[in-house]
Image (spheres, helix red, strand yellow):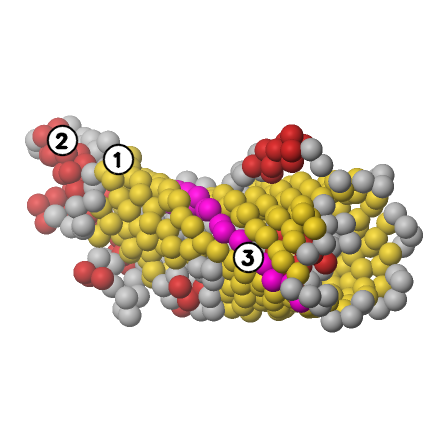
Amino acid sequence: MKKTQIARLVAALLGCAATGSAFASAFQLYEQNASGIGNAFAGSAAAAEDASTAYFNPAAMVFMANPRQVSLGVDIVKPTANFDNRGSTAANNASLGGNGGDAGPYSYVPAGHLAYALSKDFSLGLSVGAPFGLKTEYENGWAGRYQALLSDLKTENVNPSFAWRINDKIAVGAGLNYQRFTAELSQAVNFGAAMCANASVAALCSAGLLSNQDGVSSVSGSSNAWGWNVGIAAQLSETTRVGVSYRSAIKHKLTGSVSFTYPDVSLPSSVPNGAAIASGLNAAIRAQAASGPVSVEVKLPESWTISAFQQLDERWSLLADASWTGWSSLRSLDIYRDSGSLLSSSYYNWKDTWRVALGGGYQWNQDLKLRAGLGYDQSPIRAAYRTPRLPDTDRVWLSFGFNYKLTPHVSVDTGYTHIFMKNTDIAENGYHADYNPGGINTTNAASRGTLVGQYSGSVDMLGVQFNYLF
């Protein structure tokens, strides 16, 4: 293949370096290919069916039937997250608010992969995608506005890799990951409660003149960091293949800023010296909650995957997958001002999780292959620490898909998955006695209220991917 053609393929892959966000288990995104959506990502580290093998297990590239190909696709993800109020309490000096609407917007997760065999024993790979992402967004004025309005986490990951066949049965592979992580988190701020903490305005608060004085706090930041991945694949027989892959944790230090919007406090003319008091209150809340630079450290988790692929006969194949993700690396989210003072702290106390999947393929004819799969995905979130930013729970995947050969060199994959999620309870006020650095969260119950209720949700995913053999 000419060098110019290779350069064009690489450029096309880098063009896929767009951000992705989805309501997945925690905020990990499996959606790196449409073929995997069709079988619940069963056998991901062993299947070696298309160029996305370079991402899931680079070692398996040398076992691909067509080891020179490029795969480009996009997955459309529609989560649903609806809150039902079941006893929430309003914050001091504020009305309760509504249920917030559906917090799960549509998301688009593009990905691109290149596998290029230099010889039968050595291959190069390149994968571009979004391994982590999240977006939840609530209506202004809802009952949990002091806990969350917008949560938008995005990653862009570029992953060059290689594979080397040691002998006829064993191959190893490795890769580097350059990752950009961006985040935006916003929530309402109850300035009315802050002002009424001052005894000098107690009479105004009792009269309701400082109620519903909300502003908005928005924190945004970004980081670039490096990680790595390795894998091993074994062709145990002509019909049996297994694979093991590992992706390292990646430590990010996001730097950015916090910005506030403020209410414009005004008092009726009947209040003695009302204009001067209002002016003083407006100045005080702006000084108390000043915009400025901030930073936060986040450790995205490591993961292991073990997979198996079995060709049962000329038409039927069976795939299995088990993966572990070290979510306990995300204990808390502590945002600091550049001065070193703690702006806010959220305690997550997540646990490590397992995901298992079983899938199959049926070669209908020489051009059409059908797929199906079933998966179970644990949530890392403990019930006592659930927040409206990510009201996550365990889920079951049901998947269908197909691969259709358009020409001898071009095929298309399409996959659909519905994720079933059980209803889950929440009781959140932002305070946890086992983690309260500097006493920063001691007043959250009063200033934020308590969000009590139940979430219902599900996820629908549709993926389309084009594969080109060269």
Give 59 or 301, whichever is nearer the viewer: 59
Query: In the image, what residue occupies the spot 44% across and 69% down?
Result: 351
Confirm whether residue 218 shows in the render: yes
Numbered disc total:
3
Disc 3 to disc 1, C-alpha distance: 50 Å
Neighbourhood count class around disc 3 (C-alpha, 10 Å): few under 14, some 14–19, many 20 upward: many
Badge 3 or badge 1: first in the primary sequence: 3
x and y percentages locating residue 335 in the rendered image: 28, 51
Badge 2 or badge 1: first in the primary sequence: 1
Give 458 or 402, whichever is nearer the viewer: 402
Q: Which residue is mark 2?
A: 279
Q: Amino acid at mark 1?
A: Tyr
x and y percentages locating residue 420 in the rendered image: 64, 60
Q: Which residue is mark 3?
A: 174
Q: Is residue 169 left or right of residue 363?
A: left
Q: Amino acid at mark 3?
A: Ala
Badge 2 or badge 3: first in the primary sequence: 3
The circle drawn on residue 262 is 1
Q: Amino acid at mark 2?
A: Ser
- Quadrant where the C terminus sits is top right
Is 255 one of the magenta-colored residues? no
